[in-house]
Amino acid sequence: MKKLQLKNSLFPLLRAGSLSLLLALFITQPAFAHHPFGGKLPSNAFEGFLSGLGHPVIGVDHFAFIITIGLLAALQPKGALFIPIAFILATLGGTGIHLLGVDLPIVEVAISASLAAFGILLAMKESPKSLWLSLLAGIAGIFHGYAYGEAIVGAEMTPLVSYLLGFAAIQLGVALTALQSGRFVLSRVGEQPALILRFAGFVLCGAGVAFLSSTLLG
């Protein structure tokens, strides 16, 4: 009986380790170009929307960060949706800053550092309240959105608006999927369910540090 209980208690941890290892192998691969059309400026609404959908996913650092805020939101008893919404609204603002020609310093450093920092927050035994996480997500979103703006600078209004709609939609979809996945884990794992998400937080933090090191060492 004790062996069976030990096996049942270890299984979630082993499964978490396997999933986290696969996640680590994925997100630490070299990032592809952040432009779905290879740097070509979208010329119509369709291209703008596709480019918007692709940018946050092809940019692996952005994609990993969106997953992180979704998992953090899953740990919140109240106000979970405020975290991804604050991030998405801030990315729109960050893109607007770029389009206005305002220069933000150390953008790539800030993006990598945000992933490392939010990975730490996810790995903590007790994560901050949703209000603080929303504020931090908003600050990070400005830098992520500024990077998104690079792909659309100089575009006409129609593809520009479609681009904004595209990247807002894909970010919301990814964040909500991560949120629901996190809640599914929390509801189905019997012992220490949050440990799996904390384990993922360590992996995501490590990926952020890897991206940050690559950015700094160039």
Image: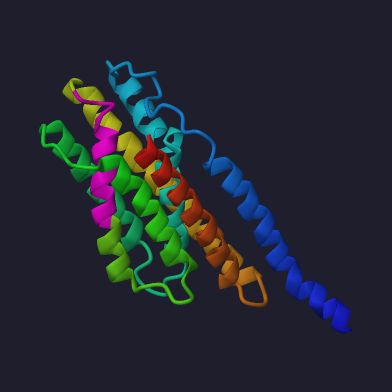
Please tell me whether residue 150 belongs to the stretch shown in magenta. yes
Q: Nearer the viewer, residue 173 or 60?
A: 60
Which residue: 47% across, 56% down? Answer: 205
Residue 215 versus residue 192 in the image, above or below: above
Q: Is residue 3 left or right of residue 76?
A: right
Q: Quadrant of the C terminus?
A: top left
Which secondary structure dominates the residues rendered in magenta? helix
Which residue: 33% across, 46% down? Answer: 111
Q: Nearer the viewer, residue 88 or 16?
A: 16
Q: Quadrant of residue 148?
A: top left
Which residue: 28% across, 70% down? Answer: 131
Q: Quadrant of the N terminus?
A: bottom right
Please tell me whether residue 212 belongs to the stretch shown in magenta. no
Snapshot colouring:
rainbow
Res 186 seen here: yes
Residue 53 versus residue 135 in the image, above or below: above
Where residue 45 appears, as percent x and y from the top left, is 29, 22
Residue 38 versus residue 99 in the image, above or below: above
Residue 183 versus residue 162 in the image, above or below: below
Q: How many marks?
A: 0
Q: Is residue 156 left or right of residue 79?
A: left
- Farthest residue, direction bottom: 2
Q: Is residue 196 left or right of residue 143?
A: right
Q: Quadrant of residue 58?
A: top left
Where residue 144 appears, as percent x and y from the top left, is 30, 43
Where residue 14 appears, as percent x and y from the top left, is 72, 63
Which residue: 10% across, 33% down? Answer: 100
Q: Nearer the viewer, residue 105 or 96?
A: 105
Magenta extent: 138-153
Where residue 93 appears, as percent x and y from the top left, is 19, 44
Res 164 seen here: no
Q: Quadrant of residue 150?
A: top left
